[in-house]
């Protein structure tokens, strides 16, 4: 997997060394000799990952990292801190600043390439979500990037898979200050629990008695239900090869024994924050997709949804030889409601009208606002007689109960006219069926309103 890696170091030999190593693995590289230049490159979207030296004059690596992670435009870019310091306090400071990982000089090639590939892979997924989520701005949802970047990474539901009682207790005690913890000693039970419960993160020991923790990680990554859950491996010094394999197939991070409490807290928070960042973007994307096909006033499907789905349904029902019916409903004298009581009352009637129609249709039916006060209902597997009966039932329910308006200070009697048609043998398109239903609606209006008229094919 190729990617653009930004190397930030004030010493030219260090830059050249990393450029050479990454170039041999087919990564493209950019360089910055100071913090402000690095930030400018990231803000222009010119890199996929940052290798950031800690010790730089002026603006050090910690400050650069905090700036990048605090900016919604750059918060998604993975940052790996590179330092000659290997004290837990330095690692904690970097992770608290938002760093995704740490590499210690001299940089181990295996650790460098494995970490870069893993983080680039995660960023590729996040980038796709970001692009789709940005569409939500057009629908007035707000700025999903700012919302996602503000996530704290606290109050998470965390699963610990560890069969060493002392180790499990120490981890749970450290994490309970900020999170909800479940400890499971049996990997089979842990697998079932993870599939049934919404966890934000799992910490998995690789050295479970009689079981391979890495296999559990693989299984969790392969299931749809648990694929998006971040995983952190708990490993021994001799587990380097398994750590590399785990990172290669998608495990997110690892911790080495003996565990440093502060590093445990920081890495846990980082992974939870990253998951929720993606969740926020995914939610914004789903919301924008929903709004694109939903009428904002009534909550019904809109004309765009009807047009895009009716053609396929029309053709499918024709191939299967099954009936297909349509109703076109129009509120009688709706203009007089707006003229007499105002558009607010008209909107209240439309919303309640849509709700009543929806109550008398099935989940498989398409109910869409066609325009103005008109609603179209598409009824799969429904013949003319049944469709007329459904329409008559809706008409009766609309007339039977007055519509409260103006914050329930008035109640209006409302009626509806309905045209009905079914797919005919000679219909070449859904438009032919809709045209006949519209003719039925016109006849219902012309002959007194508050009635159902069915048009034969």
Image (spheres, rainbow, N blue to C red):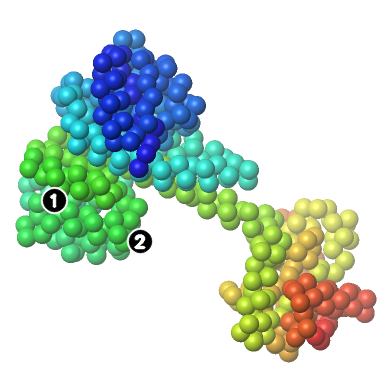
Q: Mark 2 — residue? A: 224
Q: Earlier in the sequence, mark 2 or mark 1?
A: 1
Residue at 52% over, 53% down: 286
Q: How many numbered callouts?
A: 2
Give the residue at x 63% y 82%: 319
The location of residue 445, given as percent across then percent down, is 89, 74
Direction from residue 216 to residue 228 in the image, left or right:
right
Is any part of residue 156 visible from this angle? yes
Q: Nearer the viewer, residue 324 or 9?
A: 9
Q: Is residue 100 left or right of residue 147?
A: left
Disc 2/disc 1 C-alpha distance (Å): 22 Å
Image quadrant assignment for residue 376: bottom right
Query: Vertical placement of 57 versus 281: above or below?
Result: above
Q: What residue is shown with label 1?
A: 206
Whether residue 396 is visible here, answered yes or no, is: no
Locate residue 210, reporting x and y percent.
Answer: 6, 60
């Amino acid at each position: 997997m190729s990617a653009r890696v930004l190397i930030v170091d004030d010493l030219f030999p260090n830059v050249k060394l990393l450029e050479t190593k990454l170039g041999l693995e087919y990564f493209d590289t950019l360089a910055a000799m100071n913090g402000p230049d690095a930030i400018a490159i990231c803000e222009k979207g010119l890199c996929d990952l940052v290798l950031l030296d800690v010790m730089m004059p002026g603006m050090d690596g910690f400050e650069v990292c905090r700036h990048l992670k605090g900016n919604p435009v750059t918060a998604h870019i993975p940052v790996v801190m590179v330092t000659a310091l290997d004290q837990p306090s330095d690692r904690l400071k970097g992770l608290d600043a938002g760093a995704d990982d740490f590499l210690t000089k001299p940089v181990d090639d295996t650790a460098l390439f494995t970490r870069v590939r893993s983080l680039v892979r995660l960023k590729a997924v996040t980038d796709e979500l970001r692009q789709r989520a940005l569409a939500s701005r057009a629908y007035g949802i707000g700025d999903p990037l700012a919302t996602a970047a503000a996530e704290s990474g606290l109050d998470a539901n965390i699963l610990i898979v560890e069969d060493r009682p002392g180790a499990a207790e120490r981890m749970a005690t450290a994490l309970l200050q900020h999170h909800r913890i479940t400890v499971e000693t049996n990997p089979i039970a842990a697998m079932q629990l993870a599939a049934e419960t919404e966890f934000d993160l799992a910490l998995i020991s690789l050295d479970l008695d009689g079981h391979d923790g890495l296999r559990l990680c693989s299984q969790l990554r392969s299931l749809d239900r648990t694929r998006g859950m971040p995983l952190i491996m708990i490993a021994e010094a001799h587990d380097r090869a398994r750590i590399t394999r785990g990172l290669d197939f998608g495990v997110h991070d690892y911790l080495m024994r003996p565990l440093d409490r502060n590093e445990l807290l920081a890495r846990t928070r980082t992974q939870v924050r990253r998951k929720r960042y993606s969740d926020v973007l995914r939610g914004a994307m789903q919301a924008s997709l929903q709004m694109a096909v939903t009428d904002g006033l009534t909550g019904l499907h809109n004309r765009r949804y009807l047009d895009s789905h009716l053609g396929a349904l029309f053709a499918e029902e024709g191939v299967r030889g099954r009936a297909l019916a349509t109703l076109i409903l129009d509120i009688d004298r709706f203009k007089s409601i707006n003229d007499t009581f105002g558009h607010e009352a008209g909107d209240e009637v439309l919303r309640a009208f849509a709700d009543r129609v929806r109550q008398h249709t099935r989940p498989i039916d398409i109910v869409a606002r066609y325009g103005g006060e008109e609603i179209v209902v598409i009824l799969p597997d429904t013949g003319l007689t049944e469709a007329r009966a459904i329409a008559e039932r809706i008409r009766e329910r609309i007339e039977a109960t007055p519509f409260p308006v103006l914050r329930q200070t008035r109640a209006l009697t409302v009626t509806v006219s309905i045209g009905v048609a079914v797919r005919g043998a000679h219909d070449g398109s859904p438009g032919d069926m809709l045209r006949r239903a519209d003719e039925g609606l016109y006849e219902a209006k012309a002959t007194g309103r508050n009635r159902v008229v069915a048009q034969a094919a």
